[in-house]
């Protein structure tokens, strides 16, 4: 069996910088037509110059692959309207992180004071710049996303013309919120469609499956599968592929992040095939994102074949992928 996907998109992607960027950028660019690149570098991407410089570094690192890096800014409440106007054409979205909630988010938002956030959110709404949000509180780790839903609702109600993307949703509560507000959308990762917390810590600890937001309960995974496999028009694929060196994952203080970029399409094809939903993969991995963000990615056809594919144990001696050393049922046979 053979399938093809037109212009697959990864709408939540960590490419890091420097040596790590050189390793992982070609792995995304090989099989995807574009990706929404996260801005949580050190220091974070908060200026027009930083956006342009980072894009240039990505383009150099990706080599000759046909791939568009869609850039983002790190949300700050002190951005001036004239700055947002000047940077609008260089970015696709602005990413909001609660302070300290995930990797390199220390400069994020502390508290969600509507009066403080409104000036920037109002200008974003007027300019048509979407807001992407890492939606977790600082509460008990299993409840953080569900506790954040009222904040999403507050934002959606007060800024009805602002597109708000709930990033890497993991709970049935987030899925339910999708249909309550016209301006709420979501990305879903590969790993949250496959795993629950039991896969991470139910036996021996699996550090390469540890991520934030943490994997949740079986009923949460079922809710995610339902909207992803059904190609719900408000959800799209965002890998949240988050590479860390092996010595930072297999260590005390394990870094959060699952590296899925080079095996994402194979893993998705296997999953959608297993559930008899291959006809919906195109919408989940490309069409919905194009409509939601109003983008036209480069033309790129990726062909996959139902033939076993052995996932490498490690890439460039540094980064361990999800499914390392395991066999997937689908492989990429061409991309271009």
Image: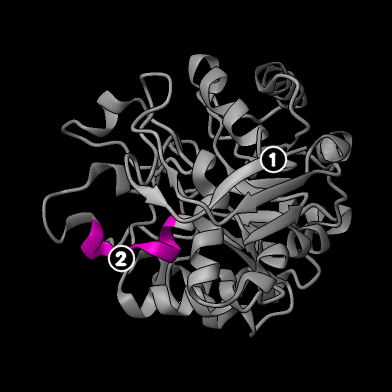
Q: Write down the region rendered in magenta.
A: 191-199
Location of residue 335 by image quarter: top right
Instruction: Give the x, y percent position of residue 251.
Output: 18, 30
**Residue tagged by mark 2?**
196
Principal secondary structure, stretch drawn in magenta: helix
228 left or right, relative to 93:
left
Q: Is residue 196 magenta?
A: yes
First-in-chain label (1 vs 2): 2
Residue occupying image coordinates x 55% and y 68%: 272
Q: Nearer the viewer, residue 114 or 213?
A: 213
Residue 118 in view here: no
Q: What's the distance in space between the residues labelled 1 and 2, CA to CA?
A: 32 Å
Nearer to us in this view, 177 or 150: 177
Quadrant in which the N terminus appears: bottom right
Q: Residue at x 54, y 37 (%)?
A: 14
Query: Badge 1 is on which residue?
Result: 334
Image side of residue 332 versus residue 127, left or right: left
Rendered position, 22 above or below 148: above
Residue at 80%, 52% in the rendered image: 129
């Amino acid at each position: 069996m053979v399938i093809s996907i037109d212009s697959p998109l990864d709408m939540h992607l960590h490419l890091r910088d420097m040596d790590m960027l050189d390793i992982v950028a070609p792995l995304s660019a090989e099989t995807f037509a574009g990706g929404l690149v996260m801005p949580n570098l050190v220091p974070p991407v908060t200026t027009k110059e930083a956006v342009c410089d980072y894009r240039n570094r990505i383009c150099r690192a990706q080599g000759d692959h046909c791939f568009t890096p869609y850039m983002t800014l790190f949300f700050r409440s002190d951005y001036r309207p004239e700055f947002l106007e000047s940077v609008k054409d260089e970015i696709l979205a602005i990413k909001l992180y609660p302070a300290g909630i995930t990797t390199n988010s220390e400069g994020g938002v502390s508290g969600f004071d509507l009066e403080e956030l409104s000036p920037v959110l109002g200008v974003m709404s007027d300019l048509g710049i979407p807001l992407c949000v890492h939606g977790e509180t600082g509460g008990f780790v299993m409840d953080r996303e569900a506790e954040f839903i009222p904040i999403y609702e507050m934002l959606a109600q007060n800024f009805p013309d602002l597109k708000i993307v709930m990033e890497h949703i993991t709970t049935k509560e987030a899925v339910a919120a999708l249909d309550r507000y016209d301006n709420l959308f979501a990305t879903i990762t590969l790993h949250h469609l496959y795993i629950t917390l039991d896969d991470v810590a139910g036996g021996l600890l699996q550090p390469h499956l540890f991520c934030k937001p943490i994997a949740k309960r079986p009923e949460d995974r079922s809710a995610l599968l339902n909207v992803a496999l059904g190609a719900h028009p408000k959800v799209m694929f965002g890998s949240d592929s988050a590479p860390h060196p092996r010595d930072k994952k297999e260590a005390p203080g394990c870094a959060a992040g699952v590296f899925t970029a080079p095996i994402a399409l194979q893993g998705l094809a296997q999953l959608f095939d297993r559930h008899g939903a291959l006809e919906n993969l195109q919408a989940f991995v490309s069409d919905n994102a194009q409509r939601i963000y109003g983008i036209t990615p480069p033309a790129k056809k990726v062909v996959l074949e139902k033939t076993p594919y052995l996932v490498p144990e490690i890439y460039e001696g540094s980064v361990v992928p999800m499914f390392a050393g395991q066999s997937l049922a689908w492989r990429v046979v061409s991309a271009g």
